[in-house]
Amino acid sequence: MSFIVTTEFDLSQVAAPNLPLAPKEFSPQYQEQLNNVLRLYFNQLDKILAQLRTSGSIDPGLINNPNGLFFSTVDQTLAVVDTAYPITFNQTYLNNEVALQSGSTSKIEVGVDGVYNFQLSAQLKSTNSSGKDVQIWIKRNNITIGYSSHRYTVEGSDNHMNVSWNFDIDLAAGEYIEMQWGADDTNVTLEAIPASAPYPATASVVMAVNYAARLPDPRPTPPP
């Protein structure tokens, strides 16, 4: 599992000190010099441990792992064929340094530089017998990521198809991801199903987000 320190600074760099050679005879000066070297080293280690601790956590020994979980409890529809629409979320379950951008229901923004793993689950429903080609793709900071589209074909009246998609993408603090969808037929929905005993409710879409690795330098250029 990958972890990150949520601070504007990288972890302090520290190396084991070169200890002074001991004299043959006991020397208070040498002992004091040795103690000072070790004291400095252990102070640096303490600083790193302080950086690793999660601020405000009940357990001060926990390490912070940015993450988020968002879902939608309502149906989502398409008004016009072959037109891009954002996939939206109206509920937040987890939002540690990952959150819906202020004023938005579709833009998932991160607060820490890194490579993030996104796990999308969606439930497509066909509302008539004809086949529909549905496409879902990624936008980062309002720019479409090339070759990111996935196509799904759903058909049959009241038939369902589950979309499950897992991908990694690099994001700097303040950048966001927005999932888009469209289809060649409007008789398809992202369907939410209310609870009916013994079954719990079904979300129309769910997005889980987890920090995976530090931001690469230089950052890769996505395909057009």
Image (spheres, rainbow, N blue to C red):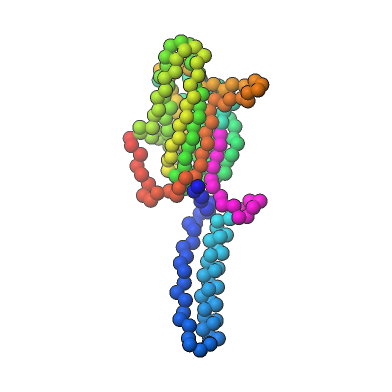
Can you see residue 212?
Answer: yes
Of residues 101 and 48, the one nearer the viewer is: 48
Picture quadrant of residue 138: top left
Q: Residue at x 53, y 61 (%)?
A: 48
Q: Is residue 6 left or right of residue 217?
A: right
Q: Is residue 151 above or below residue 24?
A: above
The verdict on residue 151 being magenta is no
Can see residue 173? no
Q: Which residues are magenta?
A: 54-70
Q: Residue 36 location in percent, x, y?
A: 54, 77
Residue nearest the viewer, comparing 165 with 92 = 165
| Picture residue at 57% right of the left edge, 44% below the top | 96
Q: What's the magenta bit mostly, secondary-structure-wise? A: loop
Up-down: is 184 above or below 72? above
Instruction: Work out whether residue 31 or residue 135 is closer to the camera in this orientation and state it.
Output: 31
**Measured from the top left, where is residue 89 in percent x and y?**
55, 30
Residue 91: image x %, image y %? 59, 32
